[in-house]
Image (cartoon, helix red, strand yellow):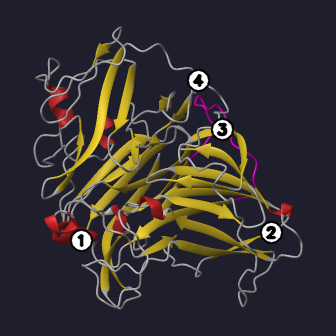
Amino acid sequence: MKTITFELTYHTITTPINTSKHLYTINGTTPGPPIIVKENDSLEVRVINNFDEPTSLHWHGMFQVTTPFSDGSPGVTQWPIQPQQSRVYRFIAKPAGTFWYHGHVHLQYPEGLFGALIVQPSANTDTDHVDAPFDDDWIVFIQDFYYMSTQHIAQTYFLTPQSEGKEPVPNAIVVNGQYTQSLYKYVNRSKVTKIRFISAGALSMFRISLDEVPMSIVEIDGVTVDPLSVAGFSINVAQRVVVTVNWTQIDPLFDRVWLRISAITENYPINITNYVAPYDPPNTPPLDPHYLATILLSTNDTSELPQTPPCTHCGDDVADSNLIIARPSIPIDAPPPTHSMYLEISVEDEGVPRSYLNNVSYILDPYTLPLLFKVNNNPNYTLAQFNIPHSFDPNLKPIHSNELGEYLLPDNAVVDIHIQNADTGPHAIHIHGTTFSSYQQAKCLKQKHNLPGTTFDVTP
């Protein structure tokens, strides 16, 4: 068993506009220390909460087959960890792939409470994971960053009539804790590097490209795929895209190139040109949506910036964040469905903006008995039917919810979930404890395609 201790503490920084900001750190750093284990390893993580507020950690992508109470979701699988208290999470590291851990209380993870969880495939892997060959292994966390406290922004602006339902635009893009043009990565140009891109964003969707060299996508959300060569790709909140880069393909004339990460500004609720948010000081510069990191090729000279031009089509060939043209390395057919569920996403602004699934805005009291405890303690637990959804397949039994937006699935059910996005913007959807097969998407797919994963993007 691998045993780890995480101490959660605040760390105060000075932002580029000379304001102070608390970051939520793990063992004094953000991103937190990476956890690197083998598939099927037993993992024990003791989390000590030195914050002055409750917290928890969610292990994003872990199946938790026999350990659901270690998932880290207050109100559902646990009570929050109270200030000056601790909790031990125990679970099996499964499946193999690129995952992450993050805070699951309020807006703590956009303030730094996250880190990588890398599960390397074991020799006797029983999951759909095939590792591509590589020499070096990078973890690249992408964040949209706010100079003011996100909790303060939510309470004084976003969740008030003043916002008119418009999401707060970030102040900067931060990669591995560094602002633009301050991150350097050194490579041997004769090698192949695996780059694990993880989006820890709160709002933004990003487009990623490398100058002068293609990337080969080999894993999406923990599922290996047939190598897919792209000039660029898009990534949304909580998604992970892993690529390999063969640096020998770069013209020897270049000894440095740009890694470009750009926020997709069309997804912001306003035109960000010259925009200063009402909660920011007047001297706050507008968001620069283009992040630049320097890749040094067999050189340590940081005195010059790359002179490589951006490609004009980076990301256009794979503009969809679901990467629907990717194919799993080991296709697994979903079993025939037994039930169906209809979910409609909507956002309403009735003085305060709220998101809804089937006309229910889920409000969770983390201090009541967690939902999983209620179900576990009562084998006959049932839900009073509310807002009965229509079934898009009359041959399947529909899954109902109650007025709280809770859905009870029968044991061993195979569920077709039809998600309708009635909002004007895309939404990233994540499922805890399992993977799904995304087999149909309007506007994009004309037939079934098996695209396993734990997070996908639902377009309007």
CA distance for labels 1 and 2: 43 Å
Mark 1 Cα within 10 Å, few/some/many (few <14, many 20+)?
Answer: some
Mark 4 Cα within 10 Å, few/some/many (few <14, many 20+)?
Answer: few
Mark 2 Cα within 10 Å, few/some/many (few <14, many 20+)?
Answer: some
Name which residue type carries label 4.
Ile
Task: Name the N-terminal-most of marks 2 and 3.
Answer: 2
Tell me if I can see residue 121 in this picture: yes
Task: Name the N-terminal-most of marks 1 and 4.
Answer: 1
* The quarter of the displayed image where residue 120 is located: top right
- Residue 153 is tagged as 1
CA distance for labels 4 and 2: 37 Å
The magenta-colored residue range is: 119-136
Residue tagged 2: 188
Task: Name the N-terminal-most of marks 4 and 3.
Answer: 3
Q: Examine the rendered structure and indicate whether residue 363 appears above or below residue 215.
A: above
Q: Secondary structure at mark 1?
A: helix
Q: Position of residue 70 (x, y in %)?
A: 32, 43
CA distance for labels 2 and 3: 26 Å
Q: Secondary structure at mark 3?
A: strand
Q: Position of residue 39 (x, y in %)?
A: 56, 40
Residue tagged 3: 225
Mark in the foreground, 1 or 4: 1
CA distance for labels 1 and 4: 44 Å
